[in-house]
Amino acid sequence: MKKILITGGAGFIGSHVVRRFVNSYPNYEIVNLDKLTYAGNLANLTDIEHKPNYKFVKEDITDADAINQLFRNENFDAVIHLAAESHVDRSITDPTAFVMTNVIGTVNLLNAAREYWKGSYDQKRFYHVSTDEVYGALGEEGMFTETTAYDPHSPYSASKASSDHFVRAYHDTYGMDCVISNCSNNYGSHHFPEKLIPLAINNIKNNKPVPVYGKGENVRDWLWVEDHARAIDVIFHHAKTGDTYNIGGHNEWKNIDLINLLCNIMDQKLGREAGESAKLITYVTDRAGHDLRYAIDSTKLQKELDWVPSLQFEEGLAKTVDWYLQNEEWLNNVTSGNYQSYYEQQYSNK
Ligand code: NAD
Ligand code: DAU
């Protein structure tokens, strides 16, 4: 019997991880801790919320007392830590929120684990979910490996890099069993529509301009979110203590090519004439400090833990579009309120 604390489980990737663990491991107790910020949505988990091995706790990881109290009350065997401020553009506007949650929040969790797991570090595991953005930007050639030097550029990636360093420091200094994975861009269902793919789907659907930053030449390496959740499962269960794995789809796309592919899919799904959705493409001012290219070399994960991505991008993107078109209520709910004012502020001067 394992009791696992999953943080950020109401968010995009976290909800897929929670669903996978609750369904795949009925003998585990899954405690989902989430502050429910604008990005956290319990509607992402309605299919599993009544399962006997699932529990939700509304808490803020920046609140050290609350986190300590939780560790005191619950005898966790492991933490899978996903809670974070995750949007690069928001980090450019408000870096402090990223320091608070991504750095201080992570250290609060590490401190609680350090205190309440004393004497049994070899039986407990702290798994930190991180990003490829800590490695900085690539030129036309090369890929990020697990030994690429950290070189973050945005406040978001700087905060994630910092949290990674703290996790490694707690392993090296206190002997805690810590594991880190660094993943490339995810896509799939339940993705908050401030990020490129769901934002573009929503705007195309509503005949609104699709904002492409700069010349649209930046490259991202896209991975199906359920393949990320499966990688987390495999790494959580099989990684050696202190180890790091890169996770990625070997699936690089220039933003403009991706948006054109998406427009074609949307034309077909919405019964529009070929080329109609692409007319919505609008080039806007570039993101400050915009990283040119990310590409992950996941050879280590593939060779050591036998993980491979399961879906071709075209198939995954079509499935993603279907999900958004079939889940209008979810989309309408998350695009109201806070998101509306963020959207107006973010794109008003572009
Ligand atoms: P998300 O923004 O969709 O979800 C983040 C979740 O964390 C939300 O449910 C939010 O309510 C919660 N949260 C935020 N601040 C909190 C706090 N102070 N206390 C408790 N909960 C809080 O993010 P995501 O895209 O699902 O990313 C999840 C994790 O995976 C992050 O750590 C991110 O850095 C990492 N990651 C994301 C991607 C990607 O493509 N989205 C790729 C690699 C790694
Ligand atoms: O690489 C992993 C990272 O991927 C994660 O760690 C982050 O949490 C996640 O948000 C994502 O970061 P990106 O900045 O790459 O994702 P985003 O969807 O914001 O942008 C993808 C690309 O599209 C990027 O080059 C910026 C561009 N873009 C984005 C938006 C929102 C646009 O051209 N127009 C837009 O409106």
Image (cartoon, rainbow, N blue to C red):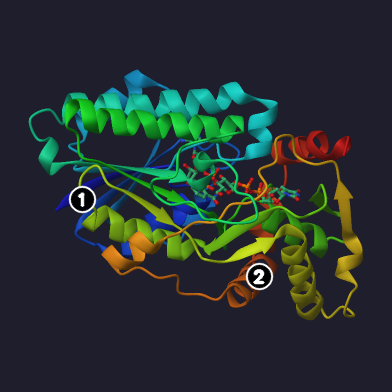
* Residue at position x 60%, y 77% in the image: 315
Kind of residue sitting beneath label 1: Lys
Would you call the spot at circle 1 few (<14 residues within 10 Å), some (14-19), or many (20 or more)? Answer: few
* Residue at position x 63%, y 51% in the image: 293
Res. 347 image quadrant: top right
Q: Quadrant of the C terminus?
A: top right
Res. 185 image quadrant: bottom right
Q: Position of residue 150 (x, y in %)?
A: 47, 37
* Position above or below: 128 against 223: above
Q: Secondary structure at mark 2?
A: helix
Q: Position of residue 95 (x, y in %)?
A: 61, 25
Would you call the spot at circle 2 few (<14 residues within 10 Å), some (14-19), or many (20 or more)? Answer: few
Kind of residue sitting beneath label 2: Gln
Which residue is at the far top?
65
* Position above or below: 45 against 24: above
Q: Which mark is residue 214?
A: none
Asked if residue 3 can be seen in this view, the reply is yes
Q: Secondary structure at mark 1?
A: loop
Left or right of residue 35, residue 18 in this image: left
Work out how far the residue at label 1 is from the one at label 2, CA to CA, in angstroms: 41 Å
* Position above or below: 17 against 160: below
Query: In the depicted view, which residue is nearer to us: 221 or 56?
Result: 221
Residue wearing tag 2:
326
Residue wearing tag 1:
240
Q: Position of residue 22 (x, y in %)?
A: 32, 59
Query: In the depicted view, which residue is nearer to us: 157 or 3?
Result: 157
Res. 321 image quadrant: bottom right
- The total of numbered circles placed on residues is 2
Look at the numbered discs 1 and 2 and tell me whether their residues touch, using CB distance below 8 Å. Answer: no
Q: Position of residue 265 (x, y in %)?
A: 74, 75
